[in-house]
Amino acid sequence: MNNVLYLATGRRKTAVSRVKVLAGSGKVMVNDRTVSEYFGGLERLRKAALNPMSIWEGVRSYDFYINANGGGVSGQAGAISHSLARVILKLNESSKSALKKAGFLTRDSRMVERKKSGRPKARKRFQFSKR
């Protein structure tokens, strides 16, 4: 896979996604599998991951090779969406306002809250007994 045009990274929770773009026919591969194979029957996640591609029609003339790791499938879908938006911005600067308005360029900073000592979970408390 030489002649890489652009590279971009996206993150969500603990998942990281890296995208390589080559001139091609609109093929999208995630970890050497098609998007449908990768997300299986989870149509909601497949749509969420590929949502930024609907902003610009020119994506059909490029192939996207995505490497996603870390986290779960939901976090990886968000990371893929973020990285695709960033690489589309590099390919077509005029799509910036549409990508920004749709919220694709903003990194979702929500993370799992850490467990606190003296509690069973981050916010849950042990049962209180008055007597």
Image: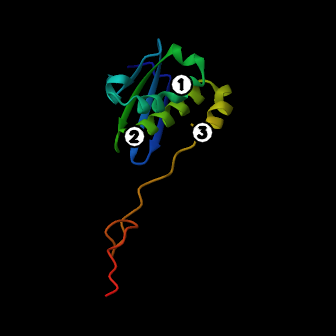
Q: What residue appears at the point 39 percent right and 48 percent down from the top-left corner? A: 14
Label 2 packing within 10 angstroms: few (<14), some (14-19), many (20+): some
Q: What residue appears at the point 42 percent right and 60 percent down from the top-left corner? A: 113
Q: Quadrant of the C terminus?
A: bottom left
Task: Please identify the residue farthest to the top as the structure is shown.
Answer: 25
Label 3 packing within 10 angstroms: few (<14), some (14-19), many (20+): some
Q: Is residue 8 visible?
A: no
Mark 2 or mark 1: whose residue is earlier in sequence: 1
From the top left corner, tell me how far across and down residue 3 is, in percent.
Answer: 45, 18
How far apart in space, not on screen, are marks 1 and 3 (Cα)?
Answer: 13 Å
Q: Give the mark toward the camera: 2 or 1.
A: 2
Mark 1 or mark 3: whose residue is earlier in sequence: 1
Look at label 3 and name its amino acid. Gly
How far apart in space, not on screen, are marks 3 and 2 (Cα)?
Answer: 17 Å
Q: Is residue 56 left or right of residue 111?
A: right
Q: Quadrant of the N terminus?
A: top left
Q: What residue appears at the point 42 percent right and 34 percent down from the top-left corner? A: 18
Judging by the rendered image, the residue that carries numbered circle 1 is: 53
Determine the secondary structure under disc 3.
loop
Determine the secondary structure under disc 2.
helix
Judging by the rendered image, the residue that carries numbered circle 3 is: 103
Q: What residue appears at the point 62 percent right and 33 percent down from the top-left corner? A: 99
Mark 3 or mark 2: whose residue is earlier in sequence: 2
Label 1 packing within 10 angstroms: few (<14), some (14-19), many (20+): some
Look at label 2 and name its amino acid. Ser
From the top left corner, tell me how far across and down residue 62 is, in percent.
Answer: 50, 17
Q: Is residue 116 visible?
A: yes
From the top left corner, tell me how far across and down residue 50 is, in percent.
Answer: 48, 27
